[in-house]
Amino acid sequence: MTMAAAELLKELSKDDRLNRIAISDTGFIFDPQTGQSFTLNRTGLVTLSILKRGSSIDETAEQLSHQYGITEETAVNSVEAFLLQLGRYL
Amino acid sequence: MDSSADFTDIGTWEPPFIQPHKMGALNKFGQRTVRDNITREVFGVPVSDLVRRYGSPVFVVGEKHLRQNIRRIKTAFQQRYNLAVHGWSYKTNYISAICRILHQEGSLAEVVSKFEYEKARFLGVPGDQIIFNGPNKPKDILRRAIEDGALNQADHMDELKMLEAVAEELDKTVKIGIRINFDTGFTEPWSRFGFNLESGQVNEAINFISRSNHLRLSSLHSHIGTFVLEPRAYAEQVRIMCELMRKLEGVENVAIDTIDVGGGIPSRNALQTIYLPPEQAVPDINEYADAICEALLAGSRYRKEIGKDLPRLIFESGRAVIDDAEVLITSVVGTKRLPDGRRAAILDAGTNLLFTAYWYNHQVKMTRNAAGSEEETVLYGPLCMNIDVVRHSISLPPLAAGDQLVISPVGAYNNTQWLQFIEYRPNVVLAQESGGCSVIRQAEDLGVMMAQDQIPAHLASFDVSGKVRPLNRSGNHPVLNRKLV
């Protein structure tokens, strides 16, 4: 796991930041802090929903690996890359 | 925790991705999206049928479209100047069937090399229907062109000397043209071709021809550039050429019967350097015809006053004739997410087939309704080269392997400048005006690729000792199945 992704997750979890993001079932998300809106792809929607519950990178990856039938290594890499994207926008 | 409790459909796996919305801001793709531009057929033939019958990728030419183009362009010129003649620029697309269609429509052949000259003759074009341009005309082909009665338009002084020598050998008096270049003030001067007017090279050439016992100057040719978006540039070109014609006709033995304005008229394609869409950036062909013909009528009016015939006008449009009469159907072979978050798709056709992708943003149409949000996408070709990019940035819905895309316009310069590099070149199919399709250039295969290769005998086997060990019973090379040199 890269430190950058772990640090970002820690930062995004502060002050309930992730939990305050509104997510629709279709992948439309709204960040009330910045007023920006975004679209998630389906896997992004699933991943962000898991992260919002306070899951760690490893826990999130484990669930994705289980649900999609991918290796945990792939899942960890993907979650970390996704967190780096979130860090750019949120 | 189980996220599947939240979603009845979790979709199939792709890396998670977030895309920001840029509401209220104009984006570079404008408002029309590729999703609005679904096409399921090209030139009246279903895309799926074409791929099933001829494979992917495949080029498709619309015969009816091509004939309509050339008729429209010729009408635009001939209704303004009835001595206007079209010369089909072979280098734009010299697939035999394309050339035949244009010759059926009355176009001359405009060729620029030994190969193109021989091809035009092979296709049955009489010598006096050929305009022979270009800077490299070896003596043997120049001799043939003179014997055939083709119009040779000289590019440089050494060619003039060669023309003189061949004409002397043949003991003939030959009517020739010269290519000239000058600054119209509108386009970047193409000074590398022909004789420069401002520096006096044109005078030198004319003096040489005047002294010759075998050459007669009968044609002035110039070509001011490519994808010229300003019709007034042509008006200025013709004005300068007519001024020169009038001056020259005071000289003994000069009777100009042809003004050849070359080509360069743009097609409705999107140059990467131009922001406006082609519908707005590219003037209609009638504007070019107006500019050229009006300037020619004005510049040659003096001839009517002295009872001389008006000169013939040759225009050598290539891309304006063929570009939008051909499309390329290509298939997605894979998709990926780039590290910077952009989507990417790998196509089975790249810059090996679509050389013009280096300077055009071709139109790309989907052939099915695709679900999912549109994102900036890069379209790569199949080559193992970083520069093999068909579109650097286009807004597309999610693509999947097997999706077919229709890329257009591709008729100009792709079937001539395409590269035999890494991949076989595919079928080119004609969607016939009368219905039905026919292959007009067969896809390459290993036999085509190996036909020109020759393997010296000492390389016949993998044995470095040099022993020749033919690997099949008949003593032939195992792949070529023929005797080695």
Image (cartoon, grey):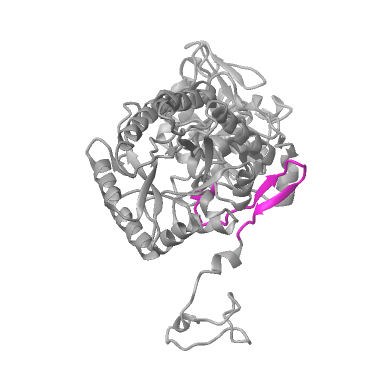
Rendering coords of residue B346 (x, y %)? 56, 44
Instruction: Name which residue lies at 59% across and 30% down.
Output: B75
In front: B142, or A75? B142
- What's the magenta bit mostly, secondary-structure-wise? loop
For the image, the number of numbered tags is: 0
Please give left or right for residue B10 compared with residue B458 in the image.
right
Q: Residue furthest left?
A: B199
Residue B425 among those drawn in magenta: yes
In front: B159, or B81? B81
Q: Residue furthest right?
A: B435
Instruction: Name which residue lies at 46% across and 34% down.
Output: B309
Q: Quadrant of residue B171?
A: bottom left
Instruction: Answer above or below: position of B14 versus A50.
Output: below
Residue A78 among those drawn in magenta: no
Q: Residue furthest bottom?
A: B467
Instruction: Answer above or below: position of B206 versus B27.
Output: below
Rendering coords of residue A5 (x, y %)? 44, 32
Rendering coords of residue B401 (x, y %)? 64, 43
In front: B20, or B425? B425
Instruction: Name which residue lies at 57% across and 41% down.
Output: B411
Rendering coords of residue B105 (x, y %)? 63, 41
Q: Residue B259: tell me if it is visible.
A: yes
Please give left or right for residue B480 compared with residue B459 in the image.
right
Please give left or right for residue B253 compared with residue A68 in the image.
left
What stretch of residues is rendered in magenta?
B415-444
Q: Quadrant of residue B193?
A: top left
Q: Residue B409: tell me if it is visible.
A: no
